[in-house]
Image (cartoon, grey):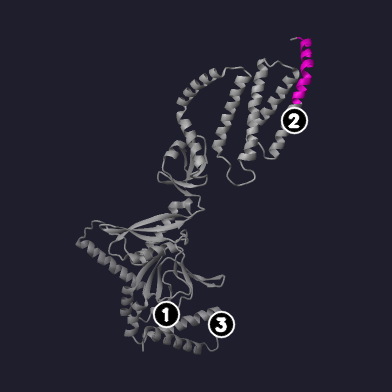
């Protein structure tokens, strides 16, 4: 191509190319304005192609290119399809997405919007084929039918998942962020695409489940945690246990579990009489749907501790074989346990005046109770007639004074609390809560009364010990002994002795 030809082409096309470039810049300005207003920003790069196609179309129109030219037909068809996409994006952003209700759901699920976009493109393409390229509709339909059959047969699994995904999004049996049970595994729904639903388990495992399988599978949906959900805690317990006592223990476990809601209230049921054991069902409500297994663990740990505190055994095996050596070993174990209890009680300063017979009695009468972390052993202001000796673990002692909570300290193995309630029947003066899994020996009034009746001097000795402990506590708080400490001690002991005698009915 010589220089003259190039100059002639430039002279003929330059004005039109310039005008087209101006139109492209104008379309880009419009596009940026729409993006600034957050309108029509879902298509992205196609907006730029739309601006360019319109600029080329205007250039060809101003030049007067005949409509029969192939270049003109291609540009017109491309500009029409891209214009339809841009207009649909604006419609989606302005109407379908409900911009007036920010944070709320859209007018239609995202998958449905995407499918309508594909249908729109197909419709505009068919229109361009019949009007611009003058193709016969019948030949197009026949060709598209054959093509659809081939494509449909090849992509039948994909199409099945697409339509299943559309059905799921239109029915909305669950939403993004909900927790479901899939094949016994709790998982959170994180995304729904054309082909599959993506889930994430608590172990961080990503599951891509085809939409067709999700639609056909029976899924248990727990929601997002906004609404309370009840989970069944089931256990077999011996048939000879009174149902009222078992239910009381189960409801106490639910009361102490942090993740269990008090409203709706938990419920306990005797579900079934078995041949060797009865099946009990504790219905516990929670919003911790993101940690179902953790909730089950927490509830079952509290149930175990509550059953132990109430002296309720779990169901015995269906078959039990006992031999003499096994029974002997059991007796030896019980004897060792009794010796450990006595050794622990002998370390308690309050009981140093009991004597051998008294320690033997207390060791046999004391009942071991288990508490898990966070459970309360006693509550401030509650009635009580028992004393506790810590066998293992740690407990925290605190008092509530209006809105303030004053922590008095932490007790470990060998420490005693509740002596005033045991000896005088006073309400609990403080709250004691387990700082870790703990075991305590509980001694009740009925266990201690025979010792006071048999030894008339024991009440005086105990009142003296209580008065000394109270005086030491006052001295630590005041920082110095008072002038009339001896007289105050005698008065305190006399008052305590009188209350003990009245409480135990000793004359």
* Magenta residue span: 2-21
**Separation of disc 2 and disc 3 at Cα?**
90 Å
Quadrant assignment for the C terminus = bottom left
| Horizontal relation, residue 59 to residue 300: left or right | right
Q: What residue is disc 1 on?
A: 425
Residue 114: which disc? none
The percent coordinates of residue 154 (x first, y second) are 46, 25
The secondary element bearing badge 1 is classed as loop
Residue at the limit of the structure toward the left, as seen here: 324
Residue 44 appears anywhere in the view = no
The percent coordinates of residue 394 (x first, y second) are 45, 66
The percent coordinates of residue 68 (x first, y second) are 67, 15
Q: What residue is disc 3 on?
A: 480
Crowdedness of circle 3 by 10 Å Cα count: few (<14), some, many (20+)? few
**Separation of disc 1 and disc 3 at Cα?**
30 Å
Quadrant assignment for the N terminus = top right
């Amino acid at each position: 191509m010589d220089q003259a030809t190039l100059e002639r082409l430039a002279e003929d096309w330059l004005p039109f190319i310039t005008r087209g470039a101006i139109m492209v810049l104008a379309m880009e300005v419009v596009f940026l304005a729409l993006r600034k207003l957050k309108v029509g920003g879902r298509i992205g790069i196609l907006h730029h192609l739309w601006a360019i196609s319109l600029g080329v179309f205007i250039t060809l129109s101003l030049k007067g290119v005949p409509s029969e030219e192939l270049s003109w037909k291609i540009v017109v068809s491309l500009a029409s399809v891209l214009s339809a996409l841009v207009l649909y994006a604006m419609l989606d952003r302005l109407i379908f997405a409900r911009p007036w209700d920010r944070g709320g759901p859209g007018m239609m699920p995202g998958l449905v919007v995407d499918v309508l976009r594909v249908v729109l493109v197909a419709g505009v393409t068919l229109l361009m084929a019949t009007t611009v390229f003058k193709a016969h509709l019948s030949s197009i339909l026949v060709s598209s039918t054959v093509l659809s059959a081939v494509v449909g047969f090849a992509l039948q699994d994909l199409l099945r998942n697409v339509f299943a995904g559309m059905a799921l999004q239109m029915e909305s049996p669950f939403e993004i962020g909900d927790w479901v049970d899939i094949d016994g595994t709790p998982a959170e729904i994180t995304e729904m695409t054309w082909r599959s639903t993506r889930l994430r388990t608590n172990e961080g495992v990503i599951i891509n489940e085809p939409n067709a399988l999700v639609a056909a599978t029976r899924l248990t949906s727990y929601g997002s945690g906004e609404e309370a959900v009840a989970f069944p805690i089931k256990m077999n317990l011996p048939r000879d246990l009174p149902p009222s006592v078992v239910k009381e223990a189960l409801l106490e476990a639910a009361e102490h579990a942090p993740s269990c809601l008090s409203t709706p209230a938990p419920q306990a049921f005797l579900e079934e009489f078995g041949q060797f054991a009865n099946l009990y069902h504790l219905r516990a409500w929670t919003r911790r749907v993101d940690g179902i297994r953790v909730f089950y663990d927490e509830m079952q740990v509290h149930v175990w501790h509550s059953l132990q505190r109430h002296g309720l055994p779990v169901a015995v095996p269906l078959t039990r074989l006992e031999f003499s050596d096994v029974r002997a070993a059991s007796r030896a174990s019980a004897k060792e346990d009794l010796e450990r209890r006595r050794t622990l009680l002998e370390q308690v300063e309050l009981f140093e005046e009991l004597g051998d017979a008294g320690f033997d009695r207390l060791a046999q009468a004391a009942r071991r109770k288990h508490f898990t972390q966070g459970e309360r052993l006693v509550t401030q202001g509650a009635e009580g007639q028992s004393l506790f000796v810590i066998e293992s673990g740690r407990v925290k002692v605190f008092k509530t004074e209006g809105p303030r909570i004053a922590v008095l300290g932490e007790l470990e193995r060998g420490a005693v609390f509740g002596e005033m309630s045991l000896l005088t029947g006073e309400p609990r003066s403080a709250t004691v809560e387990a700082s870790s899994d703990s075991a305590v020996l509980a001694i009740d009034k009925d266990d201690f009364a025979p010792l006071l009746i048999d030894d008339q001097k024991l009440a005086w000795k105990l009142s003296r010990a209580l008065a000394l402990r109270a005086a030491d506590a006052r001295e630590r708080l005041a920082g110095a002994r008072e002038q009339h400490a001896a007289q105050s001690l005698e008065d305190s002991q006399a008052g305590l002795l009188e209350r003990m005698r009245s409480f135990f009915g000793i004359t």
